Every structure is written in C-alpha cells, then in structure tokens.
Amino acid sequence: MAIGIGIGVNTARLHARVQALDTIETLETAASDQVDGIDADPSPYLLLTGADVRLTDAQRLAAQAYATRRGLDVLDLVPATLSPHQLLDLARMVDPASFPSRRIARGRSAGAAVLVRRDVLVRSGLLAATDPTHTTGTTQAVGTVQAVGTADIGGLTAAELVALLQLGKRHAPITTDLAVLPGLSVADDRGAHRWTVQRTAYAWEPAQLVLPALRDAAILLTAGGCPPAALAALTASWLQPALVGGRRVRVTGADLVRSPLRRRRDGVGQLRAAATRVWPGRAGETPARPPASPTSAASARAGQTGQAGPAGPGEQGRGLRRELLEVSVRPDPAQVARSRVVYQADLAAGLDRFLEPAQAHCPWCGADDLVAHLRGRDVTQGKPGTFRYDRCTACGHIFQNPRLSLDGLDFYYRDFYDGLGASALEELFGFDDRVYLERARQAIPTPRRWLDVGGGHGHFCNSARSIWPSTQFDLLDMGGGVEQARRRGWADEVYRGQFPELADGLKGQYDILSMFHYLEHTREPQAELDAAARVLSPGAHLLVEVPNPHSPAARWYGSMWPGWLIPQHQHLIPAANLVAALEERGFETSGPIFGEVHQPGDPLSVPFGFLQTRAPSPSNPWGSAEVSTAPRLRRAALATALAPAFAAGLVLDGVTRPYLTGGSRSNAYRVLARRR
C-alpha cells in the first residue's frame, strides 16, 4: 500500500512539473502582434536539432518570437507528444517552475531541438567566434526569415542536446528555459538511446539511475504478501505517463499499452550497460553509443566531415565542437597520459623539495610553544606524502609545519580545481546554491560593488545576484577559473593573482569584500587581512568564513575531516584569534557566527578517504601506471562494499546536526566586520 501511495504522490509531483511548461503559440494560431521583434534581419539564434527532427518555418518563427519576448538566450523545444519513457525522464530531470530562476541548476533537455543565441555558443567554446559557417548578417546565413525552418546544426544525439543545455544554463543562468512547441515531433527510439541520455544527465548522480529499478523491486517483494496492493501499484505505474503528461504533453494509446514492458526492458538494459563499465576487458573504455539509425549515423559522419547528411537540410554538426558535449566522470585518457609523464618526473625528483624547513615559532603570535597536533595524508586526491600540523599552546593557532613550498603548492593543487579535476569540482560547487544564498543574505546596506576573494570559478558571485540584483560582483583568484567566470557572465570584473599584491590598486572601490574558505589556504593569513584593511574604506564590510578547528567534528573524523583538507589547508584559525586580528586592523565585529554556518557531509569523508587510500583511482596520473583491469575492479568492489558506510554517513550527518549546530560546535564559523 505504501508503495502505491508513493507512486501516486510522485505522479502528482511529476504532473505539476509538466504542467508548469509553457506552450508556444505557432504562427498558424497566433495573432500577428505576438511575433514582434522578428523582422527581416538575420536571427541572433541558431537552431540545433536531433536526427530526423525538422521545424517548419512557422514553428521556428514562433520559437524565435517566444524566446525574444522573454529575453531568453537558450530555449529547449519540447515536443507535444513523447514516448512514455521520454516524458517520465524529462519530468524527473527538471522542474520547469524553478529552473529558469535558479542561477545554479543542471541544464536539462527533451532531446529534440534547442534554440540558442550564437553568443552563448561562442562563449561556451562550442563555436568559434570567427566561424563563417554560422555568422549572421550574410545572405547565406541560416536563421533569417527567408530560411527559418532549416536547422543550422542538425543530427545531434539526444545526449548531446542534454549536454548542450548543461553548458547553456551555465552561460545563460537566468535566460535558459523549456517550452512545448506544438507540432514538433521526435522519433521514438524505442529506448535505444535512453541509457546514453541518462548517463549524460546523471553522470554525477548515479543513484538516480537505479531509483525506478528499486521501485519495481519493492513492488515484486510485496507481491507475495499482498497481491492486490502489488497489482494496484503496478497499475499506477502503468498509467503514470498519461497522468503525468495530462493535456500538456501527450503519449499515444499504443505507446501507453506497451509502456510497462518497454520501460522494464530499458531498465534491465541500463543495468547491463552500467555493469560493462567495470567488466574485465572494458576498463578505461568509453561506453559505446547505442546503435544509431542510418540517418543519425549519416548525421554523425556529416558532423565529422563537414558534409551535409540526409537527416535534414541543416548543416550537420558543422563548426560545432562536439567533443565538448561528451559528459563523463572519467578524465580524458590522452590528458591523463600527458599528465602522467609530468607527475612521474616530479615524483622521481623526490618529495622533500615540496616542503620548506620547519618553523620554530607560531606564525600567528610568534610564540615558540609548539606541540604536534595532527598528522595526515592527502585523502582527497590521494597524492603521496605525510603532513604534520602543529598547535601553538599560547594562542591555539594550528598550522602546517613544515609548510608546502611553492613547488609543493603547485604539485598538490594541480588538477584539483582545474585540469583533470575541473569537472568534478564544477559539479561539487554547482550541486546546491543554498550555501551561496545563505552567505549572501547579510544585514548590510545594498552593496554597490562586491569583491569575492578566492572565489574560484565564481559560483558565489553567480548565486548572490539573486539576493542583490543591482550589485556588481567582481572576483579575485589565482586560478584560471576567473576567466571562465567572466565568459559565463558570473562575474563582472575579474582579477587573477595574489590579493596582497593587487590590493593597492583596489583601494576604495568596494562596499564589501568576502573571503569564503580562503584564509586557511593562504601562506600568510594576516597579510591577507592587512590587504583587506587597505582596500576597504570606513563603513565598508569584510565577510570571512573559515573552518572551525574547535568543532567536535575535527576530533571525531581525525585527519579525514574535510576541514583539514590536507595538505591544502595551511592554517586553522580559532574564532577568538580572527576576531582579535580584525579589531587590531580597525574593524568592529559582533563576534563569530557558528550554528547556521555548519556544512553537511563530514561523516562521508571517512568512507571516501578509506576508498581513496586503499583503492585509489587508476586514472590518477600520480599513481601507479599499472595497465591491467585489476585496480579498477578493486576500486569498484571496495566502493560497493562501502555503500552501507556511505548510507550510514548520511544518517549520522542528520543525527548529529542538531548537536553540532548548537553553541560554537559547528564545523565552520563566519565573521562580519565593519571598517571603522
């Protein structure tokens, strides 16, 4: 009974999502004043379609008019009729009611056709800025009123269109949307491409792939004890596509009849495809795409050769960097091989050069009363080396001793935030925007300009605009992520380099300066505070957030506690020390804030650290160059065995949260200071 109720509740949830989709009026039914903004000039939009998908002139004009009226840069066109699995997959992937306004959200597509401003394709790197193939304003430009029905780029797979929406959403955070286009149809692939689409959509959320299978397993388990309840649950699951689509997106009766068997068959196929990813003899291979129709195969060849295929009149992938639409959790093998050469040379030269001589005095207060506090390894990337952290008994400051040299910083940061680790960090930082929104909600006057120091790729700057829409958000960081933030439009102005060295050129320009989990990474945190004091004028604010070394979590999880992030974190600053240092530099504070600053996920660091140290990924170029499948199988087996530990970690995280958010026990704290 509970399973049937769950299916009913989920059906209502998915139905609400589909009904939130807007419907585009085509020119046959729309009034003439509804296509304002579409004239005889070349369109700024390019139309990208899947194989065998074509739009009429009226459909494309209507889509362009809709996108223009709403100021959209990216518009996914949803067919008004879908197969049951296509409809359910779309409804599970995206909530159209909140999707446009959420600045950080994964892009999702129905996999049929996408209308994109050329500028977005250029900024995302998918299209060259000087590519003459798709340059508007010429007599050959596709996208003018005279040729609106033709796809500019056709023959893309449904998975590539999903990846395109992911890139589009990142480069057009609040101008990306989905809408139903009447008359648009997409061929039923009979589930052949379903695994590829879902693997692209849920590359970093693999649990999502097995939820339908778990539902079916639960129904089967109840069948013996209560057959009527199991039959009712199966019936509800059978009718689910029609109930979810309603009148907005329909499924045909014939498809609905065949739906139960086909969806279960597809589920079995997905499990088989997942198994082949770790089966001996296939390690390191990219899973093959499902068999394509002759039309789509010709389209793919056209995308490689630049020649038009028979899938449609548009230019089949011509000029588009389709390699950027391949989504995988595994790094590119060629890039790994190139990096391995560099790493092995670094390791051959020895690890000693990565550390400076040990310090005899506390870098915070200068006292020489130091005691060993912690030893640990790099459990995040699994790079070699053991690191010691000392504690000053005079002031309580904890610091890495000996600290990393400049060469060591380069070695241990390499491929973490960029390079081989860029995709993983993109997903980690872009998984949930609630932490960024909570940081932005400060009781301060509306800032004119806000500088985020150490802000990486600009996720905070992007999200915080939802709270302060009139504020200019600028970004400062040492990494190349600042340039990416500029291209995406997440940051208005960016600075790349060391903050203390750039500070004098920034004096008096900002109303607030933020440092979120930045100070602990720096070599001289007090020099960073000095720089902030130079930049900010009286009345301006400084917002600092750092790990709390006095949190019970730091003791519970030992060297695997994320707050240590060994060896990147070089200083763990007690709250009293930070407040005192700010007051010495002319700031006034109301004291540190703890509870609400607590970040979830600490217990998961233990099984993850165990996995990283006992069965490191064979893709790591700093590890063994063993080419057999054994390392990959060992890692897969250990990850499977640790699944209960990860589940227990989630439970423990929730159970301990009320305790850790009380008093000053949170794993992080924040200080808002005002310049006197």
Image (spheres, grey):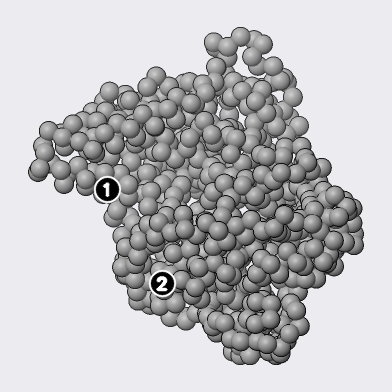
Residue 544 can be seen in this image: yes
Q: Residue at x 64, y 56 (%)?
A: 593
Q: Return the residue nearer the eye: 428 or 559.
A: 559
Which quadrant of the view contains residue 237?
top left
Numbered mark located on residue 611 in the image? 2
Numbered mark located on residue 103 in the image? none
Graded by Cα atoms within 10 Å as few (under 14), some (14 to 19) or many (20 or more), the crowding at tag 1 reads few
Q: Residue at x 53, y 76 (%)?
A: 378
Q: Is residue 630 left or right of residue 514?
A: left
Counting residues from the start of the chain, the first of labels 1 and 2 encountered is 1
Q: Secondary structure at mark 2?
A: helix
Q: Is residue 640 left or right of residue 217?
A: right
Image quadrant in which the N terminus is located = top left
Q: Is residue 452 left or right of residue 121?
A: right
Which quadrant of the view contains residue 501?
bottom right
Three-letter amino acid code of the residue under disc 1: Leu
Where does residue 490 sit, x and y in percent of width and height? 70, 47
Q: Return the residue nearer the eye: 218 or 602.
A: 602
Residue with the mark numbered 1: 214
